[in-house]
Image: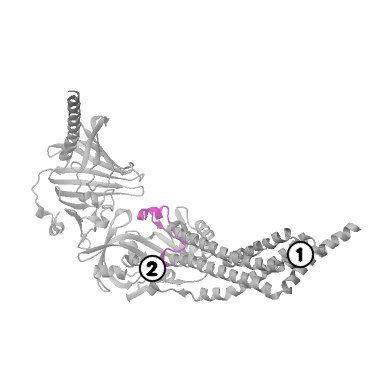
Amino acid sequence: MKRRFIAILILSTLCVLSLCAQDAKEIVKKANDLLRGTHTYSEISMTIVKPEWTRTISMKSWSLEPDYALVYISEPARDKGSVTLKRKNEVWNWVPSIQRIIKIPPSMMLQSWMGSDFTNDDLVRQSSIVDDYTHSILGEETYEGMKCWKIQLIPKPEAGVVWGKIYLWISKGSYLELKTEYYDEDGNLQKSFFGSDVKTFDGRSIPAHWEMIPSNKPGQKTVLDYHEMKFSINLDAAFFSEQNMKRVR
Amino acid sequence: MSSRSEHHGQRHSGNLYVLLAWRNIWRNKRRSLLLITSVVISVFVAVVFSSAQFGQDEYMVHVTVGFYEGHIQVHGNHYWDNRSFDQSMEMPEREIDEVAATAHVACVTPRLETISLISHATTTKIASVVGIDPEREDNMTGLKKRMVAGKYIETGSTGAVVSEGLAQLLHVGVGDSIVVYGQGFEGVTAAAIVPIQGLVKYPLPDLNNSMVYLSLGFAQQLYSAPSRLTALAVLLDDNKALDETAAAIKKVVDGDKEVMTWKEMMPELVQGIDANDAGTVLMLLILYVVIGFGIFGTVMMMTVERTREFGILVLIGMKRWRLIVITVIESILVSAVGLVVGVLISIPPVYYFYFNPIHLGGDYAKAMLAYGFEPIVPLSIAPIVFTIQGFSVFGLGVLSALYPLFVIRSLRPVSAMHG
């Protein structure tokens, strides 16, 4: 009788634990789905801030999740017409000034993209914050006046992820990813990602202003401002071709 | 009066000790020559051995710094840690000339260096792209001598000299064009189609597969960095003047620049030399043990031979301490002669192999070539080689003289006489 009671206790505890985990994953999935449509078009300006200089790049981006993306640079004038194409785990660049397509070799994937705090790898990364991590709710915190879940993401052993852990702050009810902290395997904060200025695009309310701040480079950050977003445009894989890199406007 | 004569007598006896010791040495020439020879050979072996070792260290530094980096480099502040154009510098010709005019500076060469993608058809590789002043670069690193095809670049050329291995990887040759694609100053995209006008060959595969040289002006234009440099490499005429020259250059350049010596830039080379030196110290210790026992054996034999003589001297009234003083002086004289002769006869071979380094063969030579070194062992003629080894062996000789001392102190004259 006693033994049976303990068994039930253990079972129910396991249930509750798994329910919690399910819950955290569900929250992350909802937040992720909100930001990332499957057939997305967006217009973005990216500002690279360094202690010595600042530079703003305007771009248009098409993406067909999870395998395809194409980014067209419209400003500054010197780089106008440059295109970055992502196909599966490969990246190509079209350089209009010399009329050449250049494939980015794997060894360059961790280098900065367009001088920003994003790497080429950030563009093609296959890992998903939903499927490649184990999620748990650490608690509730108020961030920028909004009640948030603080969720911890630990990469699954088989996932090829460079981070040791990630903390996510997701607003309750609206499922906005307001703050993300990336830690290395030694538990040191590497970079933080902040979302703010919630706007409605194509019927979805999401942050339109993002700041990526690397923690070991004072005075440096990359700012993204979304001006336009559409979440279900007509796109297929054929759009993401080398020919189209030269044609797209 | 009496005290003065005593004093006089003592000074006289001081000279007498040396005189007696000197006569003792020549009394049995064969015995003394034997001891001198053992010291001479020891000094000779120790000097040649450590000269080869010092020579190898000096050669390693000479080759590495002369190969590319130079003894000293001037950068924009924090450039070496970041290797980014953000830490590049402006350096007017006047400032370069001032650095070049600093004492001990043999030559200088300005560079604008970065990593870029090099592409041809469907192949893309990563390479170091270096904008150089063609004349100064050749002066310092002998780049022209490494040319295996085509033409060397001139000031203002818009072509590239590419390392042979990289050209092979891209399947290109002289006359073909490559795409250079990277990031310029302040994040601007840098892209150009550049004709290959020449090929250089490096023995080190890593380097041979990854170098592209452009003229400095063309590189500055390509990377939107007009009149900027990432480094001014400085070669010295004497590595021993490293720190004082670095300090002197620091005074010449303006404040937002860093001046680094090869020891700061390449700590791995310093570690390599330290490891090498630790091995040498061990080998020398073993050598000293062998030498020490050699000399000691000789001294012991001679002491046994002279036990009867010592016994008689003590019996006829010679104070033991006087005998000890004479014996010690004998040892010092013999060791000193050995030291001088040993150093003198080691000078010709050391100088010969300094000017005509030993060429190595076999696997070791291949390994050295792979590291980009010519497989030779030049000897060092640094004075320290002679002084340290010479005096170490001299010290061993004098130390061996403690043995007769010990024998004389505990000598029982009668049994010694009947020996």
- Inspect the image, locate mark 2, and give the three-letter code of the amino acid beneath it: Ala
> Looking at the picture, do discs 1 and 2 lie on one chain?
yes
Mark 1 or mark 2: whose residue is earlier in sequence = 1
Relative horizontal placement of residue A230, taking residue B161 as reference (left or right): left
- Which mark is drawn over residue B311? 1
Q: Residue furthest top?
A: A1
Residue B293 lies, in percent from the top left, at 59, 65
Neighbourhood count class around disc 1 (C-alpha, 10 Å): few under 14, some 14–19, many 20 upward: many
- Inspect the image, locate mark 1, and give the three-letter code of the amino acid beneath it: Gly
Residue named by callout 2 = B367
**Per the image, is B374 magenta?**
no
The quadrant the N terminus of chain A occupies is top left
Q: Is residue B354 visible?
A: yes
User: Is residue B120 depicted above or below A4 in this figure?
Assistant: below
For the magenta stretch, what is the residue range?
B67-90
Answer with the quarter of the image where residue A109 lies.
Answer: bottom left
